[in-house]
Image (cartoon, grey):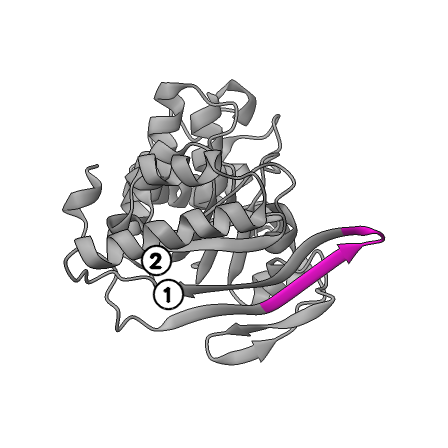
Amino acid sequence: MNEKDIPAVSPAAPVILEMNHISKSFGAVTALVDVSIKLRKGEVLALVGDNGAGKSTLIKILSGFHQPDTGTIVYQGKEVHFDSPREARAHGIETVYQDLALINHLSVYHNMFVGREYHKRVLGLKLLDNRKMRTLAKTYLETLGIEIPSVNSTVELLSGGQRQSVAVARSIYSSPSILVLDEPLAALGVRESAHVLGLIQNLRRQRSVSIILIVHNYNQVFEVCDRINFLHSGEIVLDASTSATSEEELIRIVKGGLGREAIAAAAAEVSTVTKWSEPSQGGASA
């Protein structure tokens, strides 16, 4: 699961998503100020920042829960406007929130197919095709390298890491173009976090889905992500590839945050240092 074993995203990889000049306020509270991000096909982008920085607001705009006050979303080369989460999902954007939206008393395979169940006809009656769903769920989870006791187990019997992995697997079963993970490692132990990080790393290795990962642990950022966007007070103050910076430099930027201008100055210093000290990388920031 070594990050260095995975080739960097090609600079020629198409930009699948652009959120340009996004601003959002809730009454007197300003959540986002002129935020712009880019995401390439197959890229894993870390979205980091303190609580209240605007991370959740930004992904809820992308997911159709909120509408931006200003700004545009360009998805696969076309400007789009999502009025609801259903519209975002219909376009291939799936989001896994911290609550996971799993049904505890149902089996793993039933959770995998909630809302898209397979049916069969028996004596003219429409019944759930449990055998088909069980087989498909088992095969798919094995393909992703997800280990659980049995797809017949109820979700409430799984560990936190297993539950998170099932939620991610359910989201990518529909072959989304973009997968948004909202703090998937929150409240997980070291072993459980490693389980989920392994799944993300496998997806990154395949480069078949672009991922936006909200995470607080910077070590994990450098383990599984290609690029970092650091949000502070509703603004992006750092956009850098993980190959062109380090956990220590990121921590230094955060600790220097006596205000937006201080963080921006520290970020600019890091960018200047890495620009002249690093060799040309194939996975340069968008």
Could you say whether the residue bearing mark 2 is in a helix, strand or loop?
loop
Residue located 29% across and 43% down the image:
201
Q: Which residues are magenta?
A: 21-29
Can residue 116 be seen in this snapshot?
yes
Classify residue 73 as left or right of residue 210.
Answer: right
Q: Where does the image place residue 63, in percent across and percent down from the top left?
A: 61, 57
- The residue that label 2 is drawn on is 43
Type of amino acid under label 1: Arg
Can residue 45 be seen in this snapshot?
no
Type of amino acid under label 2: Glu
Q: Which mark is residue 93?
A: none
Q: Is residue 25 magenta?
A: yes
Could you say whether the residue bearing mark 1 is in a helix, strand or loop?
strand
Pointer 2: residues within 10 angstroms few (<14), some, or many (20+)? many
Residue located 32% across and 34% down the image:
248
- The residue that label 1 is drawn on is 40
Q: Where does the image place residue 51, in percent across and percent down from the top left?
A: 61, 36
Q: Where does the image place residue 255, in percent across and percent down from the top left?
A: 47, 33
- In three-dimensional space, the C-alpha distance between marks 1 and 2, rounded to whole angstroms, equals 5 Å
Q: Where does the image place residue 274, in percent across and percent down from the top left?
A: 25, 53
Which secondary structure type mostly characterizes the magenta part of the structure?
strand
Q: Is residue 53 magenta?
A: no
Q: Is residue 219 above or below residue 136?
A: above
